[in-house]
């Protein structure tokens, strides 16, 4: 298994541009998450999904959108990039509640 | 608001010493806690977890202690090695599948 994969690894955006951060897991996990991590800080939950077709907001959802059309994929969409969205984005998945979360390698995003 | 925090931002130890990383949490209803290790440029890696019906749990070279009375969590690393250098996060399981992460403690291990 490849585990949780994320693309791209790094991206520079101009203010107002849009992009989609991709996340895929091949472990047939029901639960998937998107976090952001600002420098020197812990992770903050943006959105999560408990299964295909079901998504919900986390702590910091503003400025982001998600979809979950399949079990494997959980893309994160930024519609109008802002400097405040400069961060490292991590995707994670688990099989069941309170099991270990598997994190992807992260996407570093810089908005200028 | 509810939060999970850490007492020390940086901890420097000598190789071979035991390390103790502390964490305070504020939600007395939390029933599951996880310690993660994050190396530079990588995602968090699970180290050990503990549920609220336990006071102590041991892994390989690591021990987590939970004191529910004072809402305090600690991670003990025995015989710290240079490979243990990383940022360590405690995370509190809050509600339905929501992990709340603390700020993190950077552990520096010198030879």
Image (cartoon, rainbow, N blue to C red):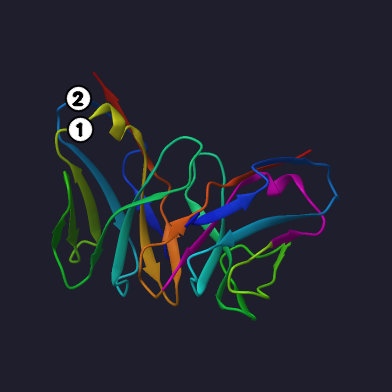
- Residue A110 in percent (x, y) is at 71, 40
Which quarter shows the C terminus of chain A? Answer: top right
| Left or right of residue A65, residue A96 in this image | left
Determine which residue is flagged by label 1.
Answer: B80
**Residue A91 belongs to the span the image colors magenta:** yes
Residue B84 lies in quadrant: top left
Up-down relation of residue B3 to residue A99 (above or below)? above
Q: Determine whether the residue tagged by mark 1 lies in a helix, strand or loop.
A: loop
- Residue B2 in percent (x, y) is at 42, 65
Determine which residue is flagged by label 2.
Answer: B15
State how far apart marks 1 and 2 are (Cα).
Answer: 5 Å
Circles 1 and 2 on the same subunit: yes
Residue A19 lies in quadrant: bottom right
| Left or right of residue B24, residue A84 in this image | right
Up-down relation of residue A70 to residue A93 (above or below)? below
Residue shown at 22% from the left, 51% from the top:
B74
| Left or right of residue A27, residue A77 in this image | right
Residue shown at 65% from the left, 73% from the top:
A68
Which stretch is magenta? Answer: A76-95
Up-down relation of residue A87 to residue A18 (above or below)? above
């Amino acid at each position: 298994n490849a585990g949780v994969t994320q693309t791209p690894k790094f991206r520079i955006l101009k203010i107002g541009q849009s992009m989609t951060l991709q996340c895929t897991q091949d472990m047939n996990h029901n639960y998937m998450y998107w976090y952001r991590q600002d420098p020197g800080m812990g992770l903050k939950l943006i959105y999560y999904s408990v299964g295909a077709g079901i998504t919900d907001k986390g702590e910091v959802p503003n400025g982001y959108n998600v979809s979950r059309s399949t079990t494997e994929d959980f893309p994160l969409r930024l519609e109008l990039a802002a400097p405040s969205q400069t961060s490292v984005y991590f995707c994670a998945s688990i099989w069941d509640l309170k099991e270990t979360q598997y994190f992807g390698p992260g996407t570093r995003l810089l908005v200028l | 608001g509810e939060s999970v925090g850490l007492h020390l931002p940086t901890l420097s130890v000598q190789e071979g010493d035991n390390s103790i990383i502390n964490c305070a949490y504020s939600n007395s209803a939390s029933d599951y806690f996880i310690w993660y290790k994050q190396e530079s440029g990588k995602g968090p890696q699970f180290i050990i977890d503990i549920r609220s019906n336990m006071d102590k749990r041991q892994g390989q070279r690591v021990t987590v202690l939970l004191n529910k009375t004072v809402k305090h969590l600690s991670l003990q690393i025995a015989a710290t090695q240079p490979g243990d250098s990383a940022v360590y996060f405690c995370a509190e399981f809050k509600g339905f599948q929501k992990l709340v992460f603390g700020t993190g403690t950077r552990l520096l291990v010198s030879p």
